[in-house]
Structure formats: C-alpha cells, structure tokens
Image: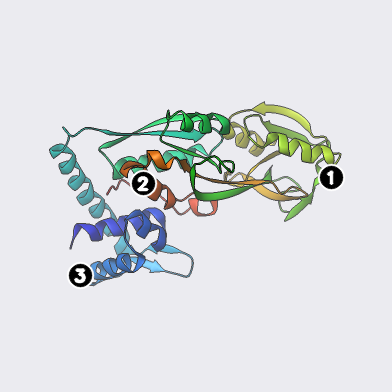
Amino acid sequence: MDIYQLRYFLAIVETNNFSRAAERAFVSQPTLSAGIKKLETELGTSLFNREARNISLTEAGRRFLPHARTVIYECNAAKQEISRKAPVQRLQLGVLRSLPTARLADLFRDFGKAHPDSQISIKDGTVSQLQSWLGERRIDIALSVMPETGSHLEFDRLYSWKYVLATPLGHPLANRNTVPLKQLDRLDFIHRSHCETGNEIGRTFASAGVSPHIVFRTDQDDKALAFVAAGVGLCMMPDILTTAEVAQVAVEGVNIGRAIGLSWSTEEDNELIRAFRLFASSHDWLPHRSGSAKNLDWAR
C-alpha cells in the first residue's frame, strides 16, 4: 500500500467524483482509477459503490476512511515538522463579496491542508475594487466575475449561476417549475443590497411593470435565506445560494446570471497561484452536489 493511493482515495471521498479527484491529485483520471483499483485489489474488497452519477463508500470503504485520514495526517505532520523553518508562501486573494461563504470556507480549509506551508491573505470587495487591486498588484488573484474585454487579465471559469426566486417550502409558488414575472407584483420581498446585479434585476422588474414590496434589506446572504425560510418575504438570488428550507423557482422573463472564476495577471503567475487555480477547479461549487460532499481532514 502506497501513500499516493491513500491520497487518491481521500480525494475521491472529498470531491465525490473521479474526474475532479484526479484534478485535485494532479494526475490523469486513468492514473487515479488504476491506483484505486490496485488499492482495492490489495485490500481484497471494493471501497466505492460506482453508480452512473453517484459515488459512495462501501461498508469497507467507511471502515478504511479513518485509517487513511490518520496516515495522511501523520505524514503531513512529519513533513511540516521537518520543514517548518522554510519560508511561508503567501497568496494574496481577492474575493467577490457576494460569493457563497460556506463553499469558500470549504475551499480555503482544504487548500490549507493540502499546502500547509502556504498562507492565504483574503480581501473581499466589489467587482471594480478587485480589478483595481489586481492592477495595483495588491492581490495576486481574484475570485470574481469574468473581467471586461481588454482588461489584459487571464480568466479560468469555475462555475455559473443564474437568478431564481427563493421561497419558503410551504409557499404556493414553491412547487412550481416556473412563475410569470407579473405574478410577483406587490408581493413581499427581501432585497440583497450587496448584489452586483441588483440594478439589473430592478430594471427587469420595472420594465415588466412589477413593483415588489420590500420588507427587508440586507447585505448578508445567510440572513436573507433564513428570513425567506421563515416566510418574511421572497427573494431573487443566485441559484448557488440555498438551504434545505428554501425552494428555488425559475422566473419567466428573468434571464440574468454570471460566470464566476479566477482572474490574474500573467505577469504575476507563479507556482502557488497555479496550485490554487488547479485546486479551485476541482472544488465542489454547485449546490446540487453539496449534500453528498463532505470536508474531511485530509491533505496532500
């Protein structure tokens, strides 16, 4: 049994996907699959249930998991102890202030475990602030919307989101596939004051003659979701923001969304930036996968 096989195993558990696990482990998918097959052969049992669109641990895999985590933790602890006098690498990261906090926290935690000798310094801001900081070299890389054409910045797309209507589960609209925009007129709404596309939503509503009744304004998405779940009001928000107590419904006539990714200057590209880009590209961003993805105490 080799260390790399344990890393492959934990990467699959973390990402719940062989392709993303291969990206996270910096190997091709056939290489990762071969390593897992060799590990299963040595153990004499399957570690994963491989279904069409779902990967889960077998009973043997669940028993094996804590041992794999312990081995990797001890290896990393030994490596860190030996090399703790090495200089710390710092990544200056800018983050769009409206991005989902929980998924960002998961990314930073996992990246920190995989790169214990690095340190992330985080600044959150608006789209214009992030692009300005990149130009001034106050940050190395930004997690934000796609930069404007002619900005001379590189961009790696990570995921896309679109605006949907958030409703409490018991609301009459909650079980609808779509709802006409006109039907939202005069309904109670929660307004996300920090959203970069808020003006675009406002213009779309106004052009359709829809005037919602704003009962609460907030720049905190967790508060907006909690108040929607409590029935205080409806809310237009990105489909990546959700909880089990809130339903999402498409609105006819509203086709607003954004591509989210990493922006950086080629002049500032380095090994740490490239490592973070690769790690972020394998991260589980979308809400329909979040229920099965678990953050485990593993590191590369």
Of badges 1 and 2, the one in the foreground is 2
Q: How far apart in space, not on screen, are marks 1 and 2 (Cα)?
A: 47 Å
Q: Are marks 1 and 2 in contact (CB under 8 Å)?
A: no
- Estimate the x, y position of residue 91 in percent, counting from the top left: 35, 35
Q: How far apart in space, not on screen, are marks 2 and 3 (Cα)?
A: 34 Å
Q: Amino acid at mark 2?
A: Arg
Q: How is the image coloured?
A: rainbow
Residue identified by numbered label 2: 274
Residue identified by numbered label 1: 182
Residue identified by numbered label 3: 42
Q: Secondary structure at mark 1?
A: helix
Of badges 1 and 3, the one in the foreground is 1
- Whether residue 217 sits left or right of residue 204 in the image: it is left
- Whether residue 138 sits left or right of residue 66 in the image: it is right
Q: Are marks 1 and 3 in contact (CB under 8 Å)?
A: no
- Whether residue 277 sits left or right of residue 5 in the image: it is right
Question: Image height check: is 70 above or below 22?
Answer: above
